[in-house]
Amino acid sequence: MAAPMIDMMRQRQFAIFVLGGLLCAGVDVGTMQLLLAGGVHHTAAASAGFGTGLLVNYAFHSRVTFGQGASAANFARYLCVVGLNYLLTIACVALAASLVANPLAGKILSLPLVAVNGYLLSKFWIFK
């Protein structure tokens, strides 16, 4: 009886993780678009959007998804996972570009890989 309940809780937590990621992607893109509309250079706007999304993502997952407070150690581990997921994304994009001449296919392929990797590392390393 306990095993199905634990599985349901894990599925719910993963769903919250994915929804939080989508929310933060909206913050990222929305910030960029607002800055672009205000005349900010696209590189600065994209960077500000990325940074804002990253901070909101960390705060959301630490408090909502995993019920933990923010700490310097957790944030450092979070940045390591962000870097790892970035490298995973770039590898998928490069692989798809070289094999099928379609970098977008690699980006799309990377999305579930990055989501699962981010969730597992968050659950068992960042917010353990």
Image: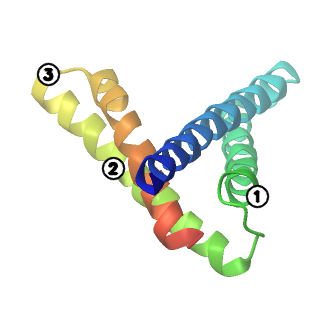
Task: Please report contact status of discs 1 and 2: CB closer than 8 Å, yes or no.
Answer: no
> Which callout, 3 or 1, points to the residue nearer the camera?
1
SS at badge 3? helix
**Pointer 3 or 1: first along the chain:** 1
Q: Which amino acid, mark 1?
A: Arg
- Pinpoint residue 52: horizontal percent, then vertical percent: 76, 46
* Quarter of the rendering occupied by the C terminus: bottom right
Label 2 packing within 10 angstroms: few (<14), some (14-19), many (20+): some
Q: Which quadrant of the structure image shows residue 55?
A: bottom right
Q: Position of residue 72 (x, y in %)?
A: 71, 78
What's the amino acid at mark 3?
Val
Circle 3 crowding by C-alpha within 10 Å: few under 14, some 14–19, many from 20: few
Separation of marks 3 and 2 at Cα, in angstroms: 18 Å
Expressed as whole percent of the image width and height from the top left, the position of residue 40 reads 81, 31
- Which residue does the numbered mark 1 point to in the structure image? 63
Outermost left residue: 99
Q: Which residue is mark 3?
A: 100
Distance of label 1 from label 2 (alpha carbons)? 26 Å
Does residue 4 lie above or below 37 as drawn?
below
Q: Amino acid at mark 2?
A: Leu
Report the number of numbered marks: 3
Residue at which label 2 appears = 88
Q: Decide which of 90, 20 is in the foreground and name it.
A: 20
Residue 81's x, y, as percent? 48, 62
Label 3 vs 2, first from the N-terminus: 2
